[in-house]
Every structure is written in structure tokens, then in C-alpha cells.
Amino acid sequence: MKSIYKFLIAAALGTTFSVNAQQLPVISQYLYNPYLYNPARTGDNGMGSINLNFKRQWTAMPYAPVTGMLSMETPINNNDMGIGAMLYSDRTHIISRIGGMGTYAYHIPFSKDYLHRLSSGISMGFIHQSFDFEAATVENPNDAQLLASTARGTSFDFSMGLNYRWKALNVGLSMLQGLNNQIRFLSAFGQEVKYINTRHFMSNVSYDFNFGTQKEWLVRPVVMTRIVPGLPVQAEVSVVGNWKKLLWASLGYRSSNWQTATSALTSSLGVELKNRIFIAYNFEITPSASLLSALGTQHEFMMAYRFGKDDKKENELISMRKEIEKLKENDRMLLDRIDKTNTVLDTLVGNTKRIEEDNKKMNEKLNEVEKAANSGNQASEELKKKMEEQEDLIKAQQNAIDKNTKDIEALREAIKSQPMKYKKMGEIGFGIGSSDLSAVEKSKLDALRPSLSTNPNATIYLYGNASTDGDQNRNMELSSKRCIAVRKYLIEKGVPQDKLIVLPMGQENTKSGTTAINPSDRRVDIMLSEK
């Protein structure tokens, strides 16, 4: 522990030992607020934000570093520029730093949507450094190199940065404490002591991967390097994840730049509310078990409030409204075609009934002809004539069946060609030759009713089907009766009748796609349009 205190004193005096130390606070929440390390990121998010950061390092060590930061940045002039400001306080035992800066950034767009641009930024500000030597813990309190009880000084400084964005890729470079200036003190014996604010060079690369059916997931790998002259290069690799712009999380590793104590395993959790309020917590530990016991863990908190118009969200809403209008127009067109198709189907059903009646009459006549032939009361010429009439009727019946089949196929193609999505909600089974709903099937409809009523703008299609056994015309009529039975029951249970469209398919919509007899073809498919 004494060696750490000696390091702090040496960093303060800059004379007794030859020491290099990282001066700027190490903040992990740059993952969510990149303005902290790069002035070029000022106002590049399309909205303004006020951010509060607080970090407590090495909780098991007395007088460990404590950092607080308050920042604000916002775009101006239609996102072509950005302005920002930051105040921070960093205290490490006897060393205290208070700094402030104002920032200006200019964004050069290469595309109208600003997804391809080059940004540059500059920050101007001050650093006030103070040393409280009365609070120092040293081995020799009479060391002639110690200053008076307190020492302080203020200097001005600047930082600058660049950032290139291409769609989901961001590449940034920045230089902090660019003047590399000195704060001078006099020791108790009149000796001049210098404290140099060393330049820090930062680089940052990140890429957003969006995936999911509605792009609800985001994964963002981030690589950052920190270069301080006289120290090894420090690298940090992190992976940030987001779900539905609501929940955030990250995992990362930061390498050491002078001893193992500066390396860390990092993690964070955050929540974002309506793209306005953001709260995050970051937890860090050193990979060394012995140092972890001596130093403890590190904790960091962030709160942010975003203000102004969200241009990205506004553009998405405009696009969504246009798509909704297109879908509504397509829906109106589809409903018109369905109405016309229903009219055709009604006509086909009527024709089928008439054909069945004609067949019945013809069968009766054939029976009479057969009886007459058997009894010898009817001449062969008359029988021949009757047979020819029967053949004509059979041909007419077959033509009607063929037309019915073509109309159904035309209906299928009309539905397939529409830019709408259909979701199968279930199917209702029937007995052979029956259109009566059993108690089990009614319970299925009762269970489906809430789902069918959830979307008031949806349309429910009832596809009636029959197996391939039996007469084709009879199967068409049976599929229609089954549709009507389901429709009638749903209306009785409160489903609006104007939402229910009946589409009898006869035996043309088998599950196997063949003409084999299948009991599962005796059903009504319930389809729900998704808007």
C-alpha cells in the first residue's frame, strides 16, 4: 500500500522520482456517450443530451480516485454543427483536478440522410490542479522535497478530434490536453516544481450489427486505444448489445498501460425509456486476484436526458405512414376482388345445385327408360334419344365443374398476388358428409375468438374444404355449408360479420396435394390477415 502512496506523492512533486502517469480519468461510459473522449461526436446523434457520470475506483483502497462529470451537447443548424460543454472533477487522495471546456463540431455530410459524413470538433477550456500535502501519507514527513501545505495552479488547454461515419461504421481519432502545458509550483525551499499535462491520443472504431425480424436486436463491437507518451499503448475491446432500444448491456476488457492495476474486466447494464431517459451502471474488476483483494472493485454510474426532435425516428414514422397507406389501398382493392369472387362463388354454388337437380331428374328419367326398355314398352329409338340427352347433360355438368375449378384457381392466385400476410389461426374439423359443429370444435372456436377480435382492422378468411371421396359438386356444396356453419357460430359469439369472408374450396385444397382420400381434408381453415 505504501508504494501506491509514494506513487501519488511522486506524481504530485514530479522531482523525487521519475514517474509517468495517466492523468485523465478512465471512463467506461464513453460506450454510451462518445462525446466524453472525442469532440467530433458533439451533436452527431440528431438529438441533444445532458449527461451525468460518476465513477468510484478501487473501493477497498483508502483515498481511491473519485470522478464526476457533467456534460451537455446538442446539434444546431439542421445537424450541420454541434455545440457542447463539460465540467469534471477528479480527486485522487491529495491530488484534485477541476476542469471545464466548451466544444464546437462541424459535420460534413456526403449523403442526404447524414449516414455518410465526416465530423471535426475542437474543445477549449481550463484545468485547475491542486495538492493538499497535509493529507499525504508518507514515510518521511520531514522530506525536504515536500511542498507547503497546499499548492495549486490553473492552465488553459484544448482538445480536438475527427470522426468518420459510413452507415453503421464509426472511426474516430482525438487528442486531449493538446497544449501539453505545465503547472508550476514552488517548494517550501523555493525550488520550482513542474506538473505537465501530457497529451493523450485516442482512437475508436465501432460497427452496429442489426438483426431480427424487425431489427429489434443490435450488437456493437467497439475497439479503443489510448496512447500517452512514455507509457505502453492501452487497448480496450468491448461488445455492446441492445434489445428494442430499451435494454443495453456490455462486456469488455481493458489492458494495462503501466502495471496490472490498470487492466480491468468491464461490464454494464442500462435501460432507455422512450429514447429520452437513459440510466446505466458499469462494474469493473482487475484480473489479478491479489490486486482485487487489495484494491477492490470499480463502479460507474451514468444518467442522461435527451431533448429535441428525433429526426431519425421522425423519418421512420413518415415512412411507416406511407407504407400503412399503401397497405390500406391494397386492402381495399383486395376486398373489392374478394366481393366479386364471392359473387362468382355464389353463382357457382347455385349452378351446382341446379346441376344436381337436373342430374336427379335425369336419373329418374333413366330409370323410367330402363323400365320401359325392360318391359318392352319403349322403342329403342326413344332410348337412344334419351341417352344422347343424358350425354349432353353430363357434358354440360363437366363444363360447369371445370369452370368452377378455374374460378377457384383464379381466386387463389388473386390472393397470393396481394402484398399482404396471412396467419393461420386454426382449423375446424367435420365428420364425413357433415357440416355440423361438434362440441369439441365449438370449444376450439371459443378459444380462438379472443385472438380473432384483438385486431379490429383485420379480416378473417374461412376456407371451406372437403375430402376427395364422393361427388365433386356435392363436395363443393359441403365445403360451403361448413364455412357458413363456422361463420354463423362466430357471429353468435360476437365476431363482427363484416370481418368474416367465406371461401369454399371444395375438394381442391387437400393437405397432401393429391387426390387421395384424407379425413383431415374435411375441415375449415381459419386465416387472419396481418396489417
Image (tube, helix red, strand yellow):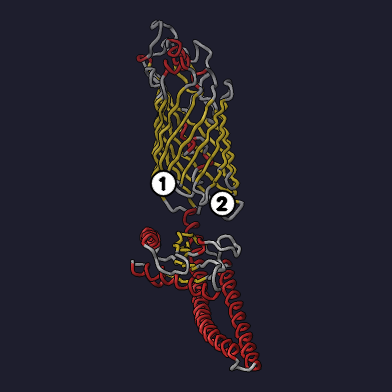
Q: Which residue is mark 1?
A: 306
Callouts 2 and 1 close, C-beta under 8 Å: no
Relative to 254, residue 440 above or below: below
Residue drawn at x 51%, y 67% as measured from the top left = 465
Amino acid beneath label 2: Tyr
Q: Position of residue 311 (x, y in %)?
A: 48, 54
Disc 1 is placed on an element classified as: strand
Quadrant that contains the N terminus:
top left
Please, which residue is most extreme toward the left here?
A: 493
**Label whose residue precedes the other's in the sequence (2 or 1):** 2
Q: Could you say which is closer to the camera, residue 246 or residue 234?
A: 246
Residue drawn at x 49%, y 75% as measured from the top left = 477
Relative to 62, residue 346 above or below: below
Q: Could you say which is closer to the camera, residue 50 or residue 94?
A: 50
Label 2 neighbour load within 10 Å: few <14, some 14-19, many 20+: some
Relative to 103, residue 504 above or below: below
Label 1 neighbour load within 10 Å: few <14, some 14-19, many 20+: many
Please, which residue is most extreme toward the front here?
A: 375
Residue 61 is tagged as none
Amino acid beneath label 1: Arg
Q: Report how far apart the C-alphas of labels 2 and 1 lie in the structure.
A: 19 Å
Q: Which residue is mark 2?
A: 114
- With 527 as the anchor, is 472 left or right in this view? right
Residue drawn at x 52%, y 76% as measured from the top left = 341
Q: Position of residue 27 (x, y in %)?
A: 46, 31
Disc 2 is placed on an element classified as: loop
Q: Position of residue 77 (x, y in %)?
A: 50, 53
Whether residue 312 can be seen here: yes
Q: Position of residue 34 (x, y in %)?
A: 50, 38
